[in-house]
Image (cartoon, rainbow, N blue to C red):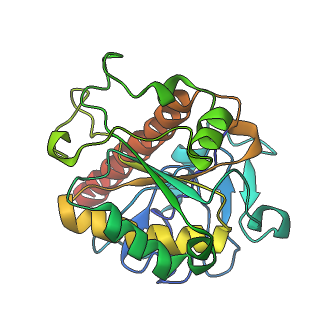
């Protein structure tokens, strides 16, 4: 499983936790407030967006988000020393459907700013584009590999992406009717603090480029045997569900 950071519904901790300043983060369930430490569910993704959102946690929404499967052991404290260390091959970042206007050179600059330790070791970027999520044709074969094998292959240079910017899909297209596209950054071999700082910078750029809310994931042991495609779909599903619930919550609040 991967770990999802979700700073969307809470007292957004301006530029400290996850670097959320005016941005929200959703995707997996990060519970946080000024009185708590960051906690994340072990399923891992966390999107966010630049908007002026309410700064008060609405408990009804939070209960709907976590009530169905909030079980002991499903959450990880991001401040735990063990989880704060680098894990996984790398450092590397898998960029899934990141807009073509966000160039690799720019991403490397963002990584240097947000993750200087990882950047000093040399960060590998691997871009994947999927035009149609409902089809298995013409997909990068790395998606069918176990995440451990995929990340190791990317890290040691045996796997190189076939990404061509000119062929990238339009980022505003919904690949599944009624659903936004999955846009994701998967980090491996990063410390938590550097991952979050780098994600903050990257997510801001993605939103400015395409008004899309990217998810973020970190490689963790429980996810390594899963096919990479499954991991991405699980992250995207959590992200979409949280987004829809947030929209419903905002609508209900506006009607009351």
Between 149 and 207, the one nearer to me in the picture: 149
Where's residue 113, x and y in %?
A: 47, 82
Q: Position of residue 156 (x, y in %)?
A: 62, 47
Is residue 178 something one can see in this rendering?
A: yes
Please tell me which residue is depicted at 58% across the width and 51% down the height of the picture. 4
Depth check: give the residue in front, 148 or 214.
148
| Residue 12 visible in this rendered orientation of the protein | no
Q: Quadrant of the N terminus?
A: top right
- Residue positioned 58% across, 26% down in the render: 145
Quarter of the view holding residue 35: bottom right
- Above/below status of 107 relative to 72: below
Q: Quadrant of the C terminus?
A: bottom left
Relative to 158, does residue 135 appear above or below in the rendering? above
| Position of residue 142 in the picture relative to residue 130 (left or right) | right
Which residue is painted at 40% across and 28% down in the image?
140
| Residue 78 rendering spot, x and y as whole percentages | 71, 66
Tell me: 90 left or right of 202: right
Give residue 189's position: percent from left, percent from top. 66, 59
């Amino acid at each position: 499983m991967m770990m999802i950071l979700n700073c969307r519904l809470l007292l957004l901790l301006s530029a400290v936790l996850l670097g959320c300043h005016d941005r929200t983060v959703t995707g997996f369930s990060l519970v946080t407030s000024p009185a708590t430490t960051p906690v994340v569910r072990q399923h891992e993704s966390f999107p966010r967006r630049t908007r002026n959102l309410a700064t008060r946690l609405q408990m009804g929404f939070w209960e709907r988000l976590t009530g169905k499967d909030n079980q002991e052991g499903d959450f990880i404290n991001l401040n735990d020393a063990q989880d704060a260390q680098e894990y996984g091959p790398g450092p590397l970042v898998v960029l899934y459907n990141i807009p073509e206007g966000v160039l690799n050179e720019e991403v490397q600059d963002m990584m240097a700013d947000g993750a200087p330790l990882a950047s000093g070791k040399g960060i590998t970027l691997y871009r994947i584009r999927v035009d149609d999520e409902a089809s298995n044709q013409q997909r990068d074969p790395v998606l069918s590999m176990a995440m451990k094998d995929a990340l190791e292959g990317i890290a040691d240079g045996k796997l190189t992406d076939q990404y061509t910017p000119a062929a990238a899909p339009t980022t505003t297209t919904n690949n599944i009717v009624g659903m936004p596209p999955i846009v994701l950054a998967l980090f491996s071999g990063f410390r938590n603090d550097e991952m979050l700082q780098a994600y903050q910078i990257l997510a801001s750029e993605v939103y400015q480029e395409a008004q899309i809310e990217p998810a973020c994931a970190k490689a963790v042991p429980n996810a390594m045997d899963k096919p990479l495609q499954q991991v991405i779909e699980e992250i995207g599903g959590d992200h979409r569900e949280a987004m829809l619930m947030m929209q419903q919550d905002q609508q209900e609040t506006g009607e009351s």
